[in-house]
Amino acid sequence: MSENSAALLIPQTLIQSKRLLIHLVRDPMTLVQSIVYPALMLVILDIVLGQQVSAFSGTSSLFGTVPMTALLSAMLGSVAGAVTLGREWDAGILARFWVLPVHRASSLTARAAAEAARILSTTAAITAIGFLLGFGFEGQWYSAVLFVAVPVVFGIAFATAVIAASFVLGKTALVESVSLLCSLAMFLNPGFVPLAAYPTWIQPLVQYQPMSCAIEAMRAIAMGEPAGSSLAAAGAWSAAIFGIAVVPAYRGLRRATQPR
């Protein structure tokens, strides 16, 4: 059977995903970035701004901050994963896979699967903390599945873009650039404060940036409101980001696995 046979892709993806997840669990910095930091931010925002935002909007601020921190967790965790990728490249670990009979696409699919598992677990953890603070679903019970699916899909697309960027920017510039992007996105979205609280000249940017669309979709799902347009916008952004980044990410990983 050829090493690039489709029949080998799934089992080899699962094996490599397990390796990445084991490394992730053993890396304290990744856990801090993807769980501890967003969870602390959720609690602090609820303490500092929760009452004011709730009074301004007429609904609990947690309907915005829980989705925001879940998405922030997905985005920050992908940076830690890209740094690990760079370390493996420098150490020659990726090059060792070149001489093994593994499917060439399994490296990228395994990283996507590992990211999906990481985002699923961190979103569940942050949502659980939100429940302790007073967050809850006002729609049907199955809305929780759709609520969690939004950051998973968005996070995979973002992680693919980060992987592609890591081969261009390098580890230091990547961390600085993506951290700056995450900081800007965190303060310019309707999950931080309601859209009406921003100056009118910046409201279109706040409303239509990718993270805002995902937050609004998650907010509508949690509140039991129609989420079709917000889900469509979030899905379109995720598809666009993934479509632009997947080929450069695959080519970068393929180049990294080749012996120098």
Image (cartoon, rainbow, N blue to C red):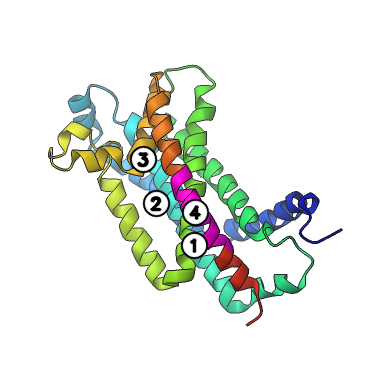
60 sits to left or right of 260: left
**Which quarter shows the C terminus?**
bottom right
Q: Is residue 164 visible?
A: yes
Using the image, determine if residue 157 lies above or below residue 258. Answer: above
Which of discs 4 and 2 lies nearer the camera? The answer is 4
Calculate the distance from the C-alpha at mark 3 to the C-alpha at mark 4: 17 Å
Question: Which element is circle 1 on?
Answer: helix
Mark 1 to mark 3 CA distance (whole Å): 24 Å
Q: Which mark sits nearer the N-terminus, 4 or 1?
A: 4
- Foreground: disc 4 or disc 1: 1
Task: Report the mark closest to the observer, 3 or 4.
Answer: 4
**Position of 98 relative to 149 (above/below):** below
Circle 1 or circle 2, nearest the eye: 1
Residue 13 falls left or right of residue 150: right
Identify which amino acid the numbered label 4 is placed on: Ala
- Residue at mark 4 to residue at mark 1: CA–CA distance: 9 Å
- In the picture of the structure, the residue carrying the numbered disc 4 is 159
Disc 2: which residue: 37
Q: Which residue is mark 1?
A: 164
Structural distance between the alpha carbons of marks 4 and 2: 18 Å
Residue bearing the label numbered 3 = 68
Provide residue 75's location: percent of width, then percent of height. 43, 51
The quarter of the image holding the N terminus is bottom right
- Residue 27 appears in the figure: no
Q: Earlier in the sequence, mark 1 or mark 2?
A: 2
From which residue to which does the magenta span run?
A: 239-250
Residue type, numbered disc 2? Tyr
- Dot 4 or dot 2: first in sequence order is 2
Q: CA distance from mark 1 to mark 2?
A: 25 Å
